[in-house]
Image: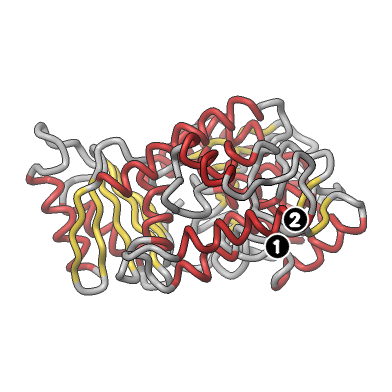
Amino acid sequence: MSTTGRTATAAPDDLAARLREAPFVRILTAADGDSVAASGVVARALDCPFQVSVTRTDAARERRAEQFADDHADEAVVLSVGNDDDGLAISGSDRPASVTAVDVASGLGASSDPVLALSGVAATGTTPGAGESERVLASATDQGLVARRPGVAVPTEDLVDGLAHSTLLHADFSGAPTTTGAALAELDLPAEMDDDARRAVASLVAISATGGEHTPRRAAEAVERALRPYATVDAPFATVGGYADVLEVTAETAPGTAVALALGHEARDAALDAWRDASERAHRALREGTTGRYDGLFVARHDAAPVATTARILRDFRSPEPVALVVGDGEAAAAATTDCGIGEAIRAAAATVGGRSSGTGRRGYAQFDPDEDGTSGPDTKEFIAAFREAL
């Protein structure tokens, strides 16, 4: 398996045909919500034993694929999800991987959980129902599984909890339940929320997330993804967007829990705990991190940051530049507003410091040995300089 930087997704029928004949399948998924959701959709459709593993770097993915091939000889079938790999792969480059996964499941003669698939779509930043996900939304709607309503996309019925820990936005109250509760109290919301009350909350969120002194104009578009959610029926989380939020964060910080969710296991409480913890660390990193601005790049450094989650929020709500890079303790992640070769750039930067990496056109991740004195050491500075040069 080699990383080529191209779109490698085969036709869904061809993927289904290969998987149908497999005695055992190992799914290697990228550490993001769409890839994990897509892996769950495919895995649930298989008639054979399978294993799903989240891999954060190219080297880890290749090592696991080679080990699996050695263990199973001619019977080895490895499916890569969320990466542009040679071999059997669902890349997610042209459309959300979760949409392709639904087609693969159909080719296997299985029905899919459209709410899980829509959550994967939402995790990419795409509005559920846009593009080829329209038919997935139609399926969920026809089955009475989702309905759009005013308000904000959060995973819990508790608004204080949901808003305080959402990573779909960044506002003054983000990461602070007490401050969130005080902001909501000023709205004098009824005990039973109606559409007017939900609109009031949405207005609070929209204003709070876009009105800051250092908020880029793109925040207005980004926060729209958190508004007018699709409420769910009989799903682990209250809204499709909230489900996506939890999947995206846990894919990075608690991958085993994310996979369990996608496979339909009882992991809701563990996922919410991981989501809350990572959210608080991400929002704190945005406030406390050391920052630097360069031409086309905005960098934030904070030892405790969940780097991928923080980079995404930084890009959408704080970065004045189109590319955001967050550097933590021995790892870094980048997120861009457009496809600008982030994966290639972060691979080059990681190689400069002897690190490991992965990435696509719009996002990237790297691991390297942490500096003895934290993020201010020579390896971190060299990594940032190499990333800037490679962009």
Disc 1/disc 2 C-alpha distance (Å): 8 Å
Nearest the viewer among 182 and 247 is 182
The residue at the point 54 percent across, 39 percent down is 181
Front in this rendered view, residue 107 or 207: 207
| Disc 1 and disc 2 in contact, CB within 8 angstroms | yes
- 123 left or right, relative to 230: left
* Nearer-N-terminus badge (1/2): 1
Q: Mark 1 — residue?
A: 128
**Residue under circle 2?**
230
The residue lying toward the viewer, choosing from 357 and 211, is 211
Q: Amino acid at mark 2?
A: Tyr
Instruction: Please provide percent x and percent y for residue 77.
Output: 62, 43
Q: Residue at x 50, y 70 (%)?
A: 220
Is residue 363 shown above or below 279?
below
Which quarter of the image is occupied by the C terminus?
A: bottom left
Relative height, residue 81 to residue 251 (above, below):
below
Query: From where the camera sits, is residue 162 visible?
Result: yes
The picture places residue 240, in percent across and down from the top left corner, at 70, 51
- Which residue is drawn at the image coordinates 44% and 53% (left, top)? 171
Q: Of helix, strand and loop, which one carries label 2?
A: strand
**What residue is at 37 percent from the left and 54 percent from the top?**
311
Q: Is residue 260 above or below residue 165?
A: above
